[in-house]
Structures are given as structure tokens and as C-alpha cells.
Image (cartoon, coloured by chain):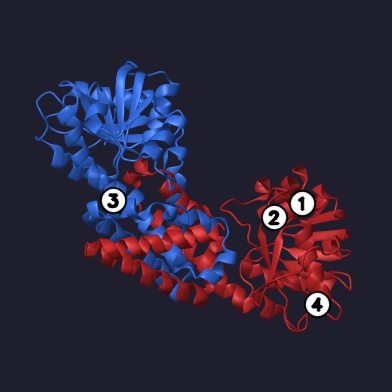
Chain colours: A blue, B red
């Protein structure tokens, strides 16, 4: 895990295409347009209603449901569709975009996508995976925000076969939207986000699902924050959790061991041990903010 | 669980004493003073430094480290100390306050406190338990806010021996600070908050404690929200979890069953079941906001 270099040249683009103009794709479009980083931003999607929303909120200049036509002159395309569809969309983009174009994505998992795409793209077209850590339980272009990436981390996962120049270009793209960029391998990425994103989602869902309806009158800030991400789209999260299945199970086992220790301390009325474990949690939480 | 009646007479007080002027106690003082509900608010605590902070931020009119002197002329005293100390402090207050005074508290658990106090107070002095669901990971009078109780739920737990008039007075007190008041038995309260507050705390702590230091660079909104309450004071939470031990273990077992189902669905790559469980979590989370 290493930080990319700072202050790359802030590049502007003639045409950027965004496949899937939801919350993330829409925010990329808004940020590009607000920061005047592209002459033209093209939104590509299946639903005309959703594309219309994206256009209305200023996320894109033009829209089309025809992917091939949409990416035809795009120097850069960002695929922002659900995880299961990303590899397929990258291949579709690669088949129709200019020969020297760059492609990236915004998927929450990276290993399977990079492996599926690696070595399958037409000569000249290059893909480097990205994951902006800026998701939320909200979906749709109506929740897009031009400042979504400001000071947020975006992981990029260049692999053997990618050039340093291309990695710098993709890193520079995200930085130009205000993000901090970290480079790491797809495998390291997937292992880390299992612990920091996918297990939290499983836990939040379990907590929300296991809370009895009649107790909801007594939920307050604690429960609401702990379960916030459980409001996310089940279909998107099913895809993420199954894509990153092994890492998620591993991280879940790790969580389970700590939970078992906490439960044992409560069961045995072991105040000293309970205090230790709660303090360990507090210190890790506090450390995340520094 | 029933909602108390709306629109009680908004009573003002001559003297209100607050034992323990931390985040909750300080917020009560700020709200009383801002809303001009008491002629005098007395802050009582052990630490002169903390009392000074409370006075500086406008939470109290006067302060003292002498509990007996502080409650001497208080018509109402609110005990806002850590759970383990509340029953003892209530008895100390009762021994020194006016003969017809009312006492309440702000403890996160109710059964043990109410049982410990029941039948032990001097004739004329009455206690009714309260729990404002307005806690946070923050502590100290410096985090007190005059609007902390606005639209928040406060549970009051009147029991056999309490009069309807006193219950209405205590309910009216919290409503005058902007809160919504629910009345229930101490046992029902403790069972419900085990699920909505104490188990979320255990889970948040386990998640924070089990996240590796080197993965913290990749935490984003999801992890941060899910673990927020783990930043709370370990000492306070040890007391709460051990006080409400049996209910917390019961609610934790309930959570564990749902978590096991989620893990099994991931393990078995059962997308249909995984979707169902995620949807169940989403629906329960969404329902909490309506």
C-alpha cells in the first residue's frame, strides 16, 4: 500500500464517458463539470428516466442508452455499474472506444474484475481498476454530489501490464476530483475492504434485521448510526459480498472472535476484561480519525 | 409501552439540582436555563474543574461539591452520574433534599436502580426513573447542548407506589426540554434497550477492536458510522453492560442467529437467501425512520 505522488499535472479531457449514472457516476459527472475538467461528459445507461434525471441535475452534458455510440470518442470511460456487470461493460467499452482510450471503474471489489478483463482488451485500450471509498446507502443520480470525492480515498489497482504513465493518469483523474489516491494490488485491496466495508455491512444488516419491530420506538443515534449502511441496495450488496466471499468470511471470523471475547466477558461478569476490550475498540476507533 | 399524554402544563421550578454535570447533566442545565424553566440550577459534582467548565458554558447557575448542601432546597434533582453510582446518589439526595422533593435520573438502565431505591427513601421524597435516549460517544460538559433533548425520546419508568401526578410531573419536565416521553416498566425498558443500544455498542466495539491497524487507511463512512459508539467511555459502558447483563446476552444471541444466517448464505453462495436477509435488514432500518 503506497501513497501515489502528489501534485500531478491536472489534466483536462475532451470527452469523458460514464457508464451507469447513479450516485457515484453522477457525482463523477458533477465534479468533472463543476471543475471544468472535460469539454463533454456523456452519460450512458439503460434507463431513459435515470439518464434524464442525471442530465437534469447537471451530472452530464449528453446521454445515450447506446453504449457503443456513447464511448465512441471518449478518451476516458468510467464504468460505474453494479459489480457483476463491470467486467462485461469494460469489454463492451473497449470494443467501441478510440484505440488509445483509457478505461477505469468504480467497483467495490477489484480482483475478479481485473482478472476477468486482463489480457482480453483490444490492442491500445487500457484498463486500470479504481474504487472510490465514497459509497453510501443512497443511490441514484438524485443523490449525486459534486464534492463527493473531496478528501475521500480512491484506491487504484494497476497491475503487471499497466504502465506507470497510465497509473499516473488515472491517479491524476481522481485527484483532480479532490480525492486522495492509494495504489495497491487488487488482492490487497479486496482483503482490506472485506474488513473495513464488507463485514461492517454484514454486521449492520444483521443488527437491523434482528431488531424487533416493537423495539424501533426506542432506537436512537447509536442504533441508527450502527445500522445506517443496512439501508443500502440489497442487490448491489449481494453482488459485492459474493464477489469478495472468501475475504469477507475470513474478516467475519476475525470479528466473531472479538465478539465472542466480549460476550464471554459479559457472561462471566469479568469487568476487567470487558473494560480492556471496550478500550481496545475505542482506541482503534479513535485512531481511525487521526 | 404507551405514549404519555400531550401538552401538560409547562411547569417552572425554583431550584433544580443536577448531580453529575457531564454531557447529559450539562445539557439538562443548558436547556433549563435557555428555556427559563428554573430560577436556579445547581450543579453538583466531585471535580471542581468539571464544575467550573459546566458553569463557564452556562449549564448551571451555581456549583458545589457538597451534595447535601446542593440539594438542600431543590424541588427536583436529576442524578446524571454513571449507572453504578446512581442508586447511592439518589439515596444521598433523598436524605438531604426537601421533604416533598422529586428525584429522577438519566441512567441507561432502570431495573436495578429502581429496585435498589424502592422503599428506601424517606417519607415524602419520591423517585421516578428516567432514561433520555440522547447519549453519544462524547462526554463532559464541554459537549453539552441546550437542544440535546429536542425531539428525542425520554423513557420514564414509574412503578407501583408512584402517583400519576408525579409521573406527569416528570414527563412534563422532559417535555419542557423538548423531548417526547414514553412510559414503561423498568423491566420492559431494560429488555428493549439491550437490543437497541447495548448490543449495538458491543457490536461496534467488536468491529472496531477487530479491525487491523493497517486497514484503517481504507475506512470510510460505513466503518466510521458503524463503529462510532465504540468511541464511548469504556468505564461507563462496562457498567451498563454488566448492569443489563442478562438482557444484553439474550439480545446478543438474537443478533448472532441472524449473523449466522447471513454468514451461511455467503458461505453457501446462496444469493437468493442473502438477498432476502439484506432486504430484511434494509426494511427494518427504513422502518426506524418512519
**Residue tagged by mark 1?**
B31
Q: Residues within 10 Å of mark 1 (few under 14, many from 20)?
A: many
Q: Is residue A169 or residue A142 the one in the foreground?
A: A142
> Compared with residue A103, is residue B53 higher up or lower down, i.e. above or below?
below
Q: Mark 1 or mark 4: which comes first in sequence?
A: 1
State the separation of the CA atoms marked 1 and 4.
25 Å
- Label 3 or label 4, whichever lies nearer to me, is 3
User: Which residue: 33% across, 34% down?
Assistant: A154
User: Which residue: 41% across, 18% down?
Assistant: A36
Residue A190 placement, left or right of B244: left
Rendered image: mark on residue B149: 2
Residue B120 x, y percent position in the rendering: 76, 82
User: Which residue: 50% across, 71% down?
Assistant: A212
Q: Mark 1 or mark 2: which comes first in sequence?
A: 1
| In contact (CB < 8 Å): disc 1 and disc 4 | no
**Residue tagged by mark 3?**
A240
Q: Chain of mark 3?
A: A
State the separation of the CA atoms marked 1 and 3.
46 Å
Residue B179 x, y percent position in the rendering: 71, 58
**Residue tagged by mark 4?**
B164
Q: Is residue A163 or residue B52 the one in the foreground?
A: A163
Helix, strand or loop at mark 2: loop
- Residue A269 visible somewhere in the drawing: no
Residue B135 x, y percent position in the rendering: 61, 57
Residue B278 placement, left or right of B235: left
> Compared with residue A105, is residue B46 higher up or lower down, i.e. above or below?
below
| In contact (CB < 8 Å): disc 1 and disc 2 | yes
Helix, strand or loop at mark 1: helix
Q: Chain of mark 2?
A: B
Residue A285 x, y percent position in the rendering: 45, 49
Amino acid at each position: 500500500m503506497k501513497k501515489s505522488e502528489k501534485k500531478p499535472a491536472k489534466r483536462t479531457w475532451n470527452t469523458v464517458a460514464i457508464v451507469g449514472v447513479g450516485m457515484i457516476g453522477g457525482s463523477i459527472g458533477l465534479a468533472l463539470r463543476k471543475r471544468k475538467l472535460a469539454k463533454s461528459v456523456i452519460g450512458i445507461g439503460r434507463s431513459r428516466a435515470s439518464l434524464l434525471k442525471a442530465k437534469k441535475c447537471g451530472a452530464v452534458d449528453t446521454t445515450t442508452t447506446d453504449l457503443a455510440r456513447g464511448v465512441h470518442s471518449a478518451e476516458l470511460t468510467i464504468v460505474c455499474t453494479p459489480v457483476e456487470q463491470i467486467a462485461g461493460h469494460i469489454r463492451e467499452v473497449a470494443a467501441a472506444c478510440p484505440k488509445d482510450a483509457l478505461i477505469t471503474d468504480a467497483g467495490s471489489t477489484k480482483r475478479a474484475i481485473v482478472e476477468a478483463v486482463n489480457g482480453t482488451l483490444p490492442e491500445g485500450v487500457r484498463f486500470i481498476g479504481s474504487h472510490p471509498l465514497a459509497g453510501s446507502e443512497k443511490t441514484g443520480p438524485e443523490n449525486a454530489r459534486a464534492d463527493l470525492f473531496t478528501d475521500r480515498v480512491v484506491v487504484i489497482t494497476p497491475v503487471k501490464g499497466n504502465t506507470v504513465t497510465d497509473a499516473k493518469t488515472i491517479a491524476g483523474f481522481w485527484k483532480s476530483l479532490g480525492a486522495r489516491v492509494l495504489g495497491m494490488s487488487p488482492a490487497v485491496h479486496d482483503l482490506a475492504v472485506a474488513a473495513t466495508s464488507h463485514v461492517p455491512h454484514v454486521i449492520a444488516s444483521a443488527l437491523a434485521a434482528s431488531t424487533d419491530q416493537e423495539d424501533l420506538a426506542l432506537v436512537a443515534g447509536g442504533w441508527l448510526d450502527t445500522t445506517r449502511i443496512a439501508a443500502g441496495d440489497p442487490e448491489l450488496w449481494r453482488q459485492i459480498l459474493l464477489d469478495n466471499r472468501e475475504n469477507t468470511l475470513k474478516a467475519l471470523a476475525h470479528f466473531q472472535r472479538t465478539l465472542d471475547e466480549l460476550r464471554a466477558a459479559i457472561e462471566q461478569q469479568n469487568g476487567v476484561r470487558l473494560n480492556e476490550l471496550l478500550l481496545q475498540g475505542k482506541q482503534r476507533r479513535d485512531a481511525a480519525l487521526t
